[in-house]
């Protein structure tokens, strides 16, 4: 069980998801963990994961081409600490997105929740 937040993954947005998958799988040699056709593909990246997502399909607003995924021991407590007004999208009880001071997306994930889907 985790006791403090930890960085667990990254997400990058692409116009051409198929070309991105080929590059990361065939050129860089990353192992694809799973994918949802036309939406995203997730790759093993050491102790973290790399998710490639097609631009325009995200369920929360994005000012950037990237998202940081941070696993937290208690999502509800972290949202309360941040202030619910700062949350731009919330999928209870699994994850919530907020913007850091520069507007970057940070996705908070509840520790221990199955995230394969």
Image: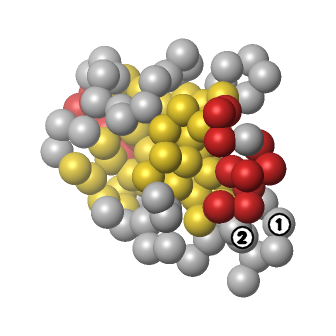
Q: Residue at x 82, y 66 (%)?
A: 4
Quarter of the image for the C terminus: give it.
bottom left
Residue 73, which numbered label?
Answer: 2
Q: Is residue 92 left or right of residue 70?
A: left
Q: Is residue 14 left or right of residue 82?
A: left
Q: Residue at x 58, y 58 (%)?
A: 109
Which of disc 1 and disc 2 is earlier in sequence?
1
How crowded pointer 2 is (Cα within 10 Å; few <14, some 14-19, many 20+) is rated as: some
Q: Residue at x 52, y 55 (%)?
A: 95
Residue at the extreme left: 37
Is residue 29 depicted above or below 55 in this figure? Answer: below
Q: Nearer the viewer, residue 2 or 49?
A: 2
* Occupied quadrant, residue 87: top right
In percent of width and height, residue 27 lies at 40, 39
Quarter of the image for the N terminus: give it.
bottom right
Q: Residue at x 67, y 20 (%)?
A: 103
Callout 2: SS: loop
Q: Nearer the viewer, residue 38 or 83?
A: 83
Cβ atoms at labels 2 and 1 below 8 Å apart: yes
Q: Is residue 60 left or right of residue 19?
A: right
In percent of width and height, residue 110 lies at 59, 65
Is residue 117 depicted above or below 59 in this figure? Answer: below
Callout 1: SS: loop
Residue at the extreme bottom: 1
Distance between the Cα atoms at labels 2 and 1? Answer: 6 Å
Residue 6 seen anywhere in this rendered image of the structure: no
How crowded pointer 1 is (Cα within 10 Å; few <14, some 14-19, many 20+) is rated as: few
In percent of width and height, residue 25 lies at 36, 46
Location of mark 1 (residue): 4
Residue 113 seen anywhere in this rendered image of the structure: yes
Q: Please count the marks in the image.
A: 2
Is residue 16 depicted above or below 9 in this figure? Answer: above
């Amino acid at each position: 069980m985790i006791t403090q937040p930890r960085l667990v993954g990254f997400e990058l947005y692409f116009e051409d998801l198929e070309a991105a998958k080929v590059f990361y799988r065939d050129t860089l040699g990353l192992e694809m963990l799973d994918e949802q056709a036309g939406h995203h593909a997730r790759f093993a990246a050491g102790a973290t994961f790399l998710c490639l997502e097609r631009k325009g399909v995200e369920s929360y607003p994005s000012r950037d081409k990237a998202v940081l995924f941070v696993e937290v021991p208690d999502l509800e407590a972290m949202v309360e600490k941040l202030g619910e007004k700062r949350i731009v999208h919330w999928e209870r009880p699994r994850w919530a997105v907020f913007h850091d001071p520069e507007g970057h997306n940070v996705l908070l994930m509840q520790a221990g929740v199955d995230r394969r889907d």
